[in-house]
Amino acid sequence: MRNYRIDSMDQVELLEEQCSEKADIPTDKIAEYLKQIFSMYGCDVVETLLEFRNELLDVIFDKFGDTTPIVRKNEDSCIATVRIQASPTFWGWYFQFPDKMRILSLEWLVQECEEWRNKRYEE
């Protein structure tokens, strides 16, 4: 799949040609793709575990869908298995919830999270 920003296109026109069969993507695959991306930034998709406070359950469902696998960790928090693209806009989304969410896996993603967290406090 590819992202194209319509607001950046020039001289767009509608053609009568049939769309390629390769471009005819089922709606469920498009929906899955949209759950993974954050504001048109693309990178490799990874599966990770997010631990979050109960109050963010609707936030998780809103972003990743209501079929997101979630298990209860304790009475205050849950763990979701999600597929993401760890782009700068993902980190922007993630850091909206300081002290209410944390990444449990993959190790390199946990380290990248700490690097982004440290950047917040640099000049």
Image: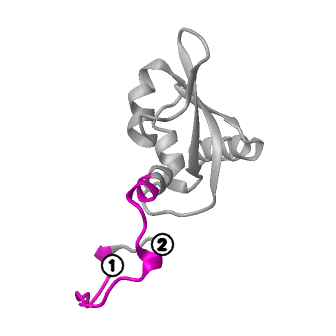
Label 2 – label 1 distance at C-alpha: 15 Å
Q: Reply above or below: 84 against 66.
A: below
* Circle 1: residue type: Ser
Q: Which mark is residue 2?
A: 2
Crowding near pointer 2: few (<14 within 10 Å), some, many (20+)? few
Q: Secondary structure at mark 1?
A: helix
Which callout, 2 or 1, points at the residue further toward the start of the chain?
A: 2
The image shows residue 117 at horizontal and vertical percentages of: 61, 41
Magenta span: 6-31
Q: Nearer the viewer, mark 2 or mark 1?
A: 2
Q: Reply above or below: 64 against 70.
A: below
* Circle 2: residue type: Arg
Q: Reply above or below: 38 against 62.
A: below
Q: Which of these two is toward me, 99 or 7?
A: 7
Q: Secondary structure at mark 2?
A: loop
Dot 1 corresponds to which residue? 8
- Residue, x 36% and y 73% (percent of image)? 5
Q: Reply above or below: 2 against 112.
A: below
Q: How is the image coloured?
A: one colour
Q: Which of these two is toward me, 52 or 98?
A: 52
Residue reaching furthest to the right: 107
- Residue, x 42% and y 20% (percent of image)? 55
Does the magenta-highlighted stretch encompass residue 9?
A: yes
The image shows residue 22 at horizontal and vertical percentages of: 47, 77
Residue 44 as seen in the image, left or right of residue 59: right
